[in-house]
Image (spheres, grey):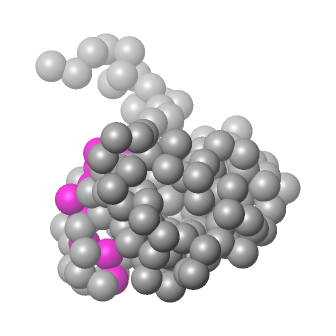
Amino acid sequence: MIPAELRAAIKENNLVLFVGAGLSCKFENKNGVEIGNWKNLVIKIIDHLENNEPKVKNLQPLAEDYSPIDMLNLIEKTGNAVRNKALEFAVDFFTLPDDKNDYSLHKKLSQLTKKIVTTNYDNSFEIAENNFRTRTTSLGDKFGFQYLHKPDEFTLLKLHGSITSADKMVAFQWATSC
């Protein structure tokens, strides 16, 4: 049973959905790798950096004992060049293909409302609803917020940033420009 308040918000076009990482974690990225959880991303970043960056060695064993944010802090301390490589990897890792995943739930959610807030970096909502391709914004975006208060305008707000702007992705404790 759908609560009356929720039905009214849908009917009046006043519903804003918050969608967390769980909605995309089973998706496969453009390289056929499952997105998984936050720890999975950090392990993939470490693996990539250990194979491609001389400054990063022997972090994989530490990932078992330390939190993902602690591991990212260690990576960040190696300098901006390594940090940027990690963000570039994250952009590639979270780029989803149009044809490999079932985006039907994303499509249904975007039919409930034109306003969605998410912590996800990926492009799943942009694939599911074409209107979000031009109406996606994130923190630091000067112009995207103008549509949030307009109920008839599609707006996808990505709180942690998006693969379309690596320099604005919140992945490290101190988010700074690349």
> In x, y percent, where is residue 62?
39, 50
Give the extent of the magenta segment: 21-30
Position of residue 70 relative to residue 176, above or below, is above
Q: Residue at x 33, y 24 (%)?
A: 7
Instruction: Find residue 55 and report its image quarter.
Output: bottom right
In terms of depth relative to the viewer, which is nearer, 155 or 94?
94
Position of residue 160 relative to residue 18, above or below, is below
> In x, y percent, where is residue 141?
78, 56
> In x, y percent, where is residue 39?
35, 50
Would residue 64 be seen by someone viewing this image from the given angle?
yes
Helix, strand or loop: magenta stretch: loop
| Left or right of residue 95: residue 164 | right
Q: Residue at x 42, y 65 (%)?
A: 58
Instruction: Find residue 9 and report its image quarter.
Output: top left
Whether residue 40 appears in magenta in the rendering, the answer is no
Which quadrant is the N terminus positioned in? Answer: top left
Specify the farthest residue to the top. 4
Would residue 126 be seen by someone viewing this image from the given angle?
no
